Image: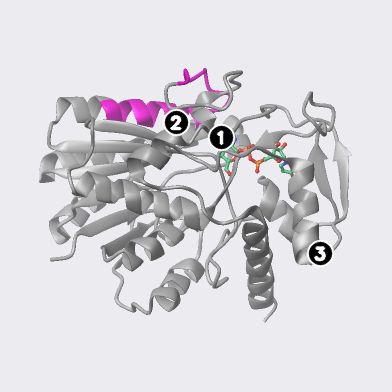
Amino acid sequence: MKKQILVSGGAGYIGSHVTVELINAGYDVIVADNMSNCDMTCYEGVKKITGKQDIPFVEMDFCDYGAVEKLFTDYKIDAVIHFAAFKAVGESVVKPIMYYKNNLLSFLNLLEAIQKYGACNVLFSSSATVYGETKDLPVTESTQRLPSTSPYGNTKQICEDILRDTVYAHPDIKGIALRYFNPIGAHPSALIGELPRGVPNNLVPYITQTAIGKRKCLNIFGNDYPTPDGTCLRDYIDVVDLAKAHVAAVTRMIEGRMKEDYEIFNVGTGCPISVLELVTTFEKVNNLSLNYQCVERRPGDVMAIWADTTLANQELGWKAERTIEETLKSAWQWEQYISQKENK
Ligand code: UD1
């Protein structure tokens, strides 16, 4: 019988790409989402890409314990990939209670239900934000986590700790935290991708929305950093590559190949790219010119962060494959698709 994976937040940006790759790898997927930050576009896109029309979809909130329990009584679940969380750094500073309540309660509810309904593997969607303003570059999984600069980042650190402690207390629960660097791009079909609500906070959606004319001008936050061209350095990971890392990690758990009951992996490319380089590469590969200006630094930004991916390469047998050119083309194709859809 096929193994069943519950994907919480499975109708969102990363969740939908992971659902596609899980189905491609032969898993059955149950998508659960409260639709607080997405619509049905990506879920419908997943069905088109995979040709699978009967992917179970449960509209529910992980903050509702009864609804979480029901998932475990309705389905036999072999592993859970937990995305369902709020993710806007700036918003979390303004609404910390909302962030702590949503991100912690949903995860606690999930773990409580898992503990009650039996053995399960848990993959937690973490972030490079847990490393804070580290000087230790590139970062490895054993690089010390520094105090978080936002409530959002703090929820990632706390959830990692909750998972670690839960796994140690319950030998039939296994856990992996994947620390994502900067996920960007879209599926090559352009049927699923990122759908930011309102003004995007992240760089690539801001770039594509400027290119299509939804935004007048891209602001590059700071060109006076002590980096080669003065702009910040990041490790931009293609979302399809990122999704494949989830399949590798889930398979490792399900096949009992983990070396420890709780493991952590960085998921990045290992290659730093500056904001300016990203902008000029986007212009080049898509043959267009972008309206941008350099402005003040954005408070809270770290100057540079990128991953040492050795552990994920060796242990998961995974490495990033798509080039930044392919990724930035896919981001542009997705923006064009979605804008056309919106204008219909
Ligand atoms: C942030 C979060 C990270 C999260 C990621 C989601 C922190 C500190 N960062 O990363 O946890 O996983 O979003 O993708 O918690 N930039 C501009 N102009 C813009 C937007 C961004 O110049 O309009 C620059 C930023 O200054 C930064 C780079 O682009 O140097 C990337 O920014 P962004 O996409 O927002 O991601 P991060 O802040 O790195």
Quadrant in the picture for the N terminus: bottom left
- Report whether residue 58 is seen: no
Local secondary structure at mark 1? helix
In the image, what residue type sits under mark 3? Answer: Gly
In the image, what residue type sits under mark 1? Answer: Ser
Q: Residue 213 carries which label?
A: 3
Q: Are marks 2 and 1 in contact (CB under 8 Å)?
A: yes
Q: Distance between the residues labelled 3 and 2?
A: 35 Å
Could you say where residue 29 lies in the image, as x and y percent from the top left? Answer: 29, 63
Look at the image and give the residue range highlighted in magenta: 143-164
Q: Which mark is residue 155?
A: 2
Earlier-in-chain disc, 2 versus 1: 1
Q: Which mark is residue 92?
A: 1
Residue at screen point 25% across, 53% down: 67
Q: Nearer the viewer, residue 7 or 28?
A: 28
Residue at screen point 11% across, 46% down: 117
Can residue 160 be found in the magenta stretch?
yes
Q: Is mark 1 within 8 Å of ligand 1?
A: no
Residue at screen point 56% across, 23% down: 132
Could you say where residue 45 lies in the image, as x and y percent from the top left? Answer: 47, 72
Where residue 76 sits, quadrant-wise, is bottom left
Local secondary structure at mark 2? helix
